[in-house]
Amino acid sequence: MKNFEFLFTAWMIVWALFFGYEITVARRITQVRQEIERLKQQLDGR
Amino acid sequence: MKARLGITIVIAALIFLAGYAALFVAPDEKTMHAVQRIFYFHLPSWIAMFSALCVVFYANIAYLITRKRKFDALGVAGVEVGVMCCTIGLITGPLWARPVWGIWWTWDARLTTTFILWILYISYLLLRGLLEDPEKKASLSAIFGIFAFLDVPLVYLSNRLWRTQHPQPVIAGGNGSGLDPLMGKVLLLCVIAVFCVMVLVFIDRYRLELLRNECDELRFEIESRSAQASSLAASFAGEVNE
């Protein structure tokens, strides 16, 4: 297949960006949830 | 949680189907051959970007009218997802252009207006990072977002209005445009797959922004309570001294 390397690179970049971004968002959600939990406990005086 | 898992599985299956169709089902293009198959993810990423930025435009106007923070959250989520889709388009485009045009990039109307669009929305995100006050941040972001959106129709129309190195539109491009029916079906499947992934990521990013707002509110409450407590302690100490 001629120029297959361009197709393969483009393919990898599309999905790497989508999944990489989704992973960072999921990680940030977990961090913020933990922070909310900590702040709630602080507010309750625990 | 179960619904979310189900949706993720369906979207993963869609991605697999779309990938298979783009690589093995779509007919080979006569002049470009394999590299033309980049089209099946290049165009859908632009469609996803335009959709995300239209939501941003709506959210920016809605924020300026209502001043509700959920619209600011929707706006920033849309910009981040839109920038990501734009980045995908800006990377896959040159990868397609190099073997076909012989160059990675050229400053024609379509590519230049798209690059400006990317810069504008990156600036939107940078601007937010520079501002501390949430009200000011949301208002200025909304105004800037509406200004940035002016480039969106320009990007869409650029290869219709001017002669560009970028090909003329193959869909809704007037006489002589159009796709092979099987290519059209594969493209539709790829558009649906990329769009679904974009929506899934968008929803998660929006949830993150809402959680951040909740976090800010809790911090504000803690700060105001501790300020109240220290003023009470100061007044009590004053009474004791008297």
Image (cartoon, rainbow, N blue to C red):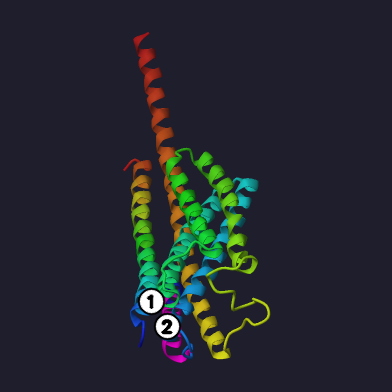
Q: Is B199 in the magenta?
A: no
In the rendered view, tell whether residue A32 sits above or below residue B111.
above
Q: Residue at x 59, y 74 (%)?
A: B168
Give the Cα separation between the discs numbered 1 and 2. 9 Å
| Label 2 secondary element | helix
| Label 1 secondary element | helix
Q: Residue at x 53, y 87 (%)?
A: B183
Residue type for callout 1? Trp
In the rendered view, tell whether residue A14 sits above or below residue B189.
above
Q: Residue at x 38, y 46 (%)?
A: A40
The answer to which of B72 and B231 lies nearer the viewer is B72
The answer to which of B5 and B60 lies nearer the viewer is B60
Question: Which mark is on residue B19?
Answer: 2
Q: Quadrant of the N terminus of chain B?
A: bottom left
Asked whether the residues under the numbered discs 1 and 2 touch, taking CB atoms below 8 Å apart as contact, a structural biologist would say yes
The answer to which of B213 and B233 lies nearer the viewer is B213
Q: Which contiguous range is marked in magenta?
A: B8-26
Q: Quadrant of the C terminus of chain B?
A: top left
Where is residue B38 shown, x and y percent of the image?
44, 78
The residue singled out by tag 1 in the image is A11
Q: Residue at x 41, y 23 (%)?
A: B231
Tag in front: 1 or 2? 1
Which of the chains bears the disc numbered 2?
A: B
Residue type for callout 2? Gly
